[in-house]
Image (tube, rainbow, N blue to C red):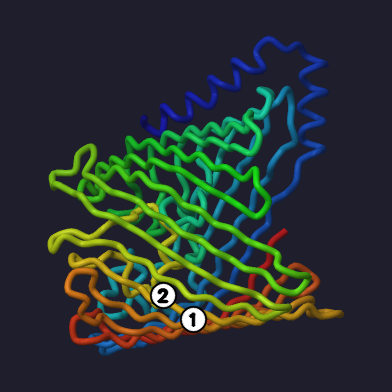
Amino acid sequence: MTRAGRGGLLGGVAALCFGGLQGPALADEIGAALMNGKPIIDARARAEFVDQDGFAEDAEAYTLRARLGFETGEAYGFSFLGEFESVISLGPEKYNSTANGKANYPVIADPEDMELNRLQLTYKSIPDTAAVLGRQRIILDDARFIGNVGWRQNEQTFDAALVRNASLPGLTATYAYIDQVNRIFSRESAQGTFDSDSHIINVNYGGIEGLSVSGFGYLLDLEEAPALSTATYGVRGAYKAELSPDWSLNLAGSYAHQEDYGSNPASVSLDYYMAKAGASYGGFSGGLGYEVLEGDGTLGFSTPLATLHAFQGWADAFLTTPADGIEDFSASLGYAVPLDGFVKKIGTSVIWHDFRSERGSGGLGQELDLVLNAFLDNGITLTAKYAGFDGDAAGPADRDKVWFQIAYSY
């Protein structure tokens, strides 16, 4: 569907919904929806530094991301959300934004851009059902397969039609047709958007306290990336048990099988599986994880619509799965403490990764990730974050990344 077609469709839906309403009644409903609406204010300033082997220059990026918008209340079951997003550089662009042509620097994928981030119409008059049409944010389960890439300044959104139903007790079924993927690389990049003919299906059961089980099928057909056009079918489960007022146990596991789909010229048959176990006591938490994305020697298991930064290390050394696949062993330890006064909470965590090839189990490297967050009582969050990847002979280049960030959301 073209952009003009999408705009016409939104307009047609609005005309169909409100066309039969007469002056005063319609005006009252719209007035009430506006009065019950809420502004969207989201700002984030960040300094990011990258020292990566293979580049003579280190990268430095000072960027500001601002999102401004408005979401109305409901009128006859309908609500409307519009949001603009702007990303600007606050200093010299000493980094490869993927759109500025500065390939002599390491990549920091935060190009300058100004765009319509979200524009969606939501309908909720059908019992236990919500339908969303337009440019929207979609995050499913842990965002391992479908997410918004929220860490980057320009988030990923979708031009889509989505329906979510919760008619059956404990069960939530989601279907989305994705017409276009608006990626993090901006409109200036040749890879900034994917024209899509993709179907997203996710059914989640949460009727037992502490338990969440999902079954999914993600059928991706991406015109600009046919090699990433795949059908992925899988299950995911997560369980949290409160063992005492202080102790809790967290378990999670997932399995998926991936095949070629749509315009993909290759033959694909790959698996994914993950297992995690963790525990927390008071403010302390810790856990172990094991995640595998298979490779067949030519292709690796792909998750092109995922929030990739959240997985396999914050240094982003494995945004593309190696052809021989990857095994990720991880261990984490964290501590969070609530406070009284101007600082409401401080949290910190450390994560260690050991990466190996799935085929042959050769070493790919190790990574250490550290983060410190301070949550203030005025809605501001301060973050300092580090990622250090030390690659083995068969792995990607060594790199160190540092971030300092201040964020505000209303």
Q: Which residue is mark 1?
A: 351
The percent position of residue 93, horizontal first and vertical second, equals: 40, 76
Q: Nearer the viewer, residue 245 or 266?
A: 245
On the rendered structure, is 395 left or right of 6?
A: left
On the rendered structure, is 287 left or right of 359?
A: right
> Which residue is located at x 77 percent, y 36 percent?
34
- For label 2, the crowd category at 10 Å Cα-Cα, with few meaning under 14, some 14 to 19 and many 20 or more, is many
Question: Height in image: 370 above or below 44?
Answer: below
Looking at the figure, which quarter contains the C terminus? Answer: bottom right
The residue tagged with tag 2: helix, strand or loop? loop
Q: Are marks 1 and 2 in contact (CB under 8 Å)?
A: yes
On the rendered structure, is 267 left or right of 117?
A: left
Question: Height in image: 32 above or below 51?
Answer: above
> Which residue is located at x 41 percent, y 58 percent?
184
Q: Nearer the viewer, residue 116 or 301?
A: 301
- For label 1, the crowd category at 10 Å Cα-Cα, with few meaning under 14, some 14 to 19 and many 20 or more, is many
The percent position of residue 22, horizontal first and vertical second, equals: 76, 11
On the rendered structure, is 126 left or right of 364?
A: right
> Which residue is located at x 49 percent, y 51 percent?
115
Q: Mark 1 vs mark 2: which is more N-terminal?
A: 2
Question: Height in image: 250 above or below 315?
Answer: above
Q: Which residue is mark 2?
A: 313
Q: Confirm whether residue 90 shows in the render.
A: yes
The residue tagged with tag 1: helix, strand or loop? strand
